[in-house]
Amino acid sequence: MLRRLVRAHPGVHLARRSDPFTALARAICGQQISVKAAEAVWRRVVAAATPPQADAAFPALLPTAVVALGHDALRACGLSTRKALYVHDLARHFAEGRLDPSSFRALPDEALIAALCAVKGIGRWTAEMFLIFHELRPDVLPEDDIGLQRAIAVHYHRGRRVAPSTIRRRADGWRPWRSVATWYLWRSLDPVPVEY
């Protein structure tokens, strides 16, 4: 089944699209709102936190700049009160070195997930998406992801919903490439890759 999905999507693969802070901040901004609304809010956050002399094509969103913005300025960008707190907390974690991207590579998947989940607004699913899409970790299984659950139901269980334990058993055969298998299963439902 997976072999057929891989053949159906040639030349398409996972690729890192931003720095760790930007990837996580953008994920928080986009939680529970439409893609279009998330993009508009994100652009305002970047504009507010980017110095005027920055390269317009590749603005660097620095954690220290977001900390300096403060909660009220983040709210003015369109973030909810809670999301403004989350993005500010994330920025402080990076600015103060509590989250150090140079240490991420050495951390096992579960240790990195735990470190990310210590930040307000980042749950296990967001951490797993970060490991898959930013860290390009090959063996992450986001068993609570609705898209993965749907794809497994469609391709392996005649559309019937299955328990997480069934998903884990099915995915055991995909080790050490569960992220890759998940990505192709997502593509089977939506051929356009989502950018995180």
Image: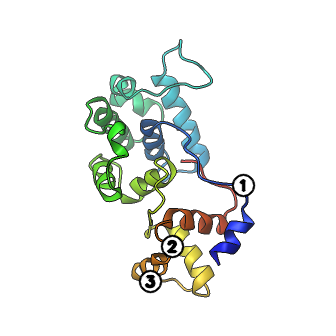
Depth check, front residue: 36 or 112: 112
Of circles 1 and 3, which is in front?
1
Which corner quadrant of the image does residue 101 belong to? top left
Q: What is the x, y in percent for residue 111?
A: 29, 54
Disc 1 designates what residue?
A: 11
Residue 160 vs 110, above or below: the answer is: below
At x 61% / y 87%, what residue is drawn? 158
Packing grade of label 2 (10 A; few <14, some 14-19, many >=20) is some
Residue type for callout 1:
Gly
* Distance in Å between CA atoms under marks 2 and 1: 20 Å
Residue type for callout 2:
Trp
Residue 138 vs 88, above or below: the answer is: below
Question: Is tag 2's residue or tag 1's residue first in the polypeptide sequence?
Answer: 1
Disc 2 designates what residue?
A: 174
Packing grade of label 1 (10 A; few <14, some 14-19, many >=20) is few
Q: Does 191 sit left or right of 55 as displayed?
A: right
Question: Is tag 3's residue or tag 2's residue first in the polypeptide sequence?
Answer: 3
Of circles 3 and 2, which is in front?
2
Q: What is the x, y in percent for residue 22?
A: 46, 36
* Distance in Å between CA atoms under marks 1 and 3: 30 Å
Depth check, front residue: 45 or 114: 114
Disc 3 designates what residue?
A: 166
Packing grade of label 3 (10 A; few <14, some 14-19, many >=20) is few
Residue type for callout 3:
Thr
At x 37% / y 24%, what residue is drawn? 69
Depth check, front residue: 76 or 190: 190
At x 46% / y 28%, what residue is drawn? 61
